Image: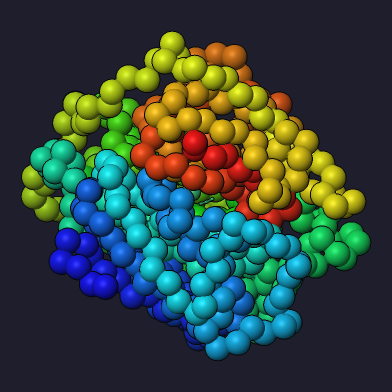
Amino acid sequence: QRTADADHYTITQRASTAEILPGVRTPIWGYDGIFPGPTIESRRDRTVVAHHRNELPVPTVVHLHGGHTPAESDGYPTDLVLPKSGWDAGHTGHGMVDARARISDGERDYVFPLRQRAATLWYHDHRMDFTGPAVYRGLAGFHLIRDGEEDALGLPSGERELPLMIADRSFDEHGAFAYPSLDRTLRTTPGVESAYVEGVFGDVILVNGAPWPVHEVAAVRHRLRFLNGSNARRYDLVLDPPPPGGGGFVQIGADQGLLDAPRAHDHLPIAPAERYDVVVDFGRYPVGTEVTLVNRLGTGSTAQVMRFVVARRALDESRVPAKLAEIPPLPREQATTTRDFSFRAGTVHGRAGWVIGGEPFSPDLMSASPRLGDTEIWRFVADIHHPVHLHLVGFRILSRGGHEPGPFDGGVKDTVDLAPGESVEVIARFDGYRGRYVFHCHNAEHEDMAMMANFEVL
Ligand code: C2O
Ligand code: CU
Ligand code: CU
C-alpha cells in the first residue's frame, strides 16, 4: 500500500561480509548487508514507511531510537519478525511467551510519522535478551530528521556534515567479530556472566565501520554528529591538539535535536546511545595540522578514535547562530506524578543480572502508566554507570546528583548516563501515542541481562 505522502524504504536484513581490517573479510549482519546500515534522511512530519525483510537466521526487531513512534512500530522487544528462510536452531532462545506480541512472518512495515524536531536518530535491533549480539554483528544505522528551522540556520552541510557512529569491536584470529556468546552463554556458562557483567568491550575503535579512520577536511567549520553506537563503552572525546583558545567542540544539539543556543566544550563525554551534535572549526588550525580525536577514557588502542587532517583552505559560508532553536520550557511545576527507579545489580532467574526497581524485565510487568498528555518527573539512581533510555519521549534533565544539571545535560535528550551512586531527575511529557513502551539501560549487555522495564501510556 504505497502512498505518495510517505517515503518508502525496503531494507533487507542479511548476513554478509565487510572489509573492516585490511585484507580481511569479517562476517556481519547488516541492514541491506552493510555496517553501518544505510543512512536514512527524512523531513519532520513526513511519514517514513520502512519495509524490513528478515533474511537472517534469527528473529529480529527494529527500533528507531529517538523516534516519536506509535507503539505498534516502536520495536517492542517481543514484536518479532521471524526469519524468512527458517530459523537456525543454534540461535534460538528462551520459550518466553508474550500474549501482546505482534509477530510477523519474514517481513513487515514499520511506520514512523516523525512528528518531531530535526535530530540525529538511529535504528538498531531490539530483540528481547539478544540486542547486544545483534547490534554487535552490525544491525545499526543512522536516521537523520531535518526540518525548516534547522535549514534556515546555515550550519555546515554537504561534505562538511559528518554523522559519526563510534563503536568498539574485538576480532578473533579469523577476523570475525568476537562476541563472547553466540546465544545465552552470558546467562548459562558459570564464570562467563561475571566476566561480562560490565558489558562487552572491543579493542578496535570503529567510526562508521572503519578502524581509526583518517579524514581530510578543509580548514572550515564541520558539523560532527556523534553517536556512541558501542554496546558498553563510554568515551570522553577531546581534540588533540586543542584549537588555540580551547572550546573546540561547539555543541549545537543533543539526542533529540538542536539546543536553544550553542555551548562550547573542551571535552565531550558520550555514553552508549547518546548523540552530540557538534561544530568543530578546523579553520582555527593551520593547514597541515593533524587533529586526533582522542578518547580520554581509553588506554592503548582504545585511546584514539580517528584523525582529521586539515588539508587545505576553503571558503566558509556556514554559521553557528547564537540562537539555534525555540525549545518550550518544561518546568518542574507541570509534573503531576513523580516516580522512582533504581538501576542496580540483581538476580535474574537465579543468576547475576541487572534490574530496575528490583525487578528483571518481563513483558507482563507494568512499571509506570502515565496518562496521555501527562507530564511526569522520573528519578533514577544507579549503582554503577548506566545510560538510561526512554522510548517515545524526549526529556529534560532537571537535576544531577542533587545539583543543577551538568554542562552536557542541556537540550532535549532520550538517554542519560548515570554515574556510580548518582541520582538524576528527568521530566517528560507523555504525548502523541498510547500503548506499551520500554525504558532500559542502553549498555546492551545490561539490557539483555534484564535491565529493562515497561511503561504504558493510557
Ligand atoms: Cu536504542 Cu530501546 O533503544
Ligand atoms: Cu529507543
Ligand atoms: Cu547498565
Across and down, in percent, residue 239 comes to 41, 43
Quadrant where the N terminus lies?
A: bottom left
x and y percent of residue 183 in the render?
A: 73, 71
Report the residue at 30% width, 71% height from top.
Answer: 9
Which residue is nearer to you in this view: 386 or 48?
48
Q: Is residue 69 left or right of residue 336?
A: left
In this rendering, position of residue 274 left or right of residue 443: left
Q: Nearer the viewer, residue 406 or 415?
A: 415
Q: Residue furthest bottom?
A: 85
| Relative to 227, residue 4 above or below | below
In the displayed structure image, the side of residue 2 where residue 345 appears, left or right: right
120 to 388, vertically: above or below? below
Question: Which residue is found at the position 20% from the left and 68% from the top?
Answer: 3
Residue at figure coordinates x 30%, y 31% from the top left: 259
Residue in the picture at 49% in, 17% down: 336
Quarter of the view holding residue 154: top left
Q: Is residue 76 above or below residue 204?
A: above
Nearer to the camera, 428 or 242: 428
Whether residue 291 appears in this view of the structure is no
Indicate the colouring scheme: rainbow
Q: In x, y percent, where is residue 307?
A: 40, 57
* Residue 433 percent across, percent down from the top left: 40, 42
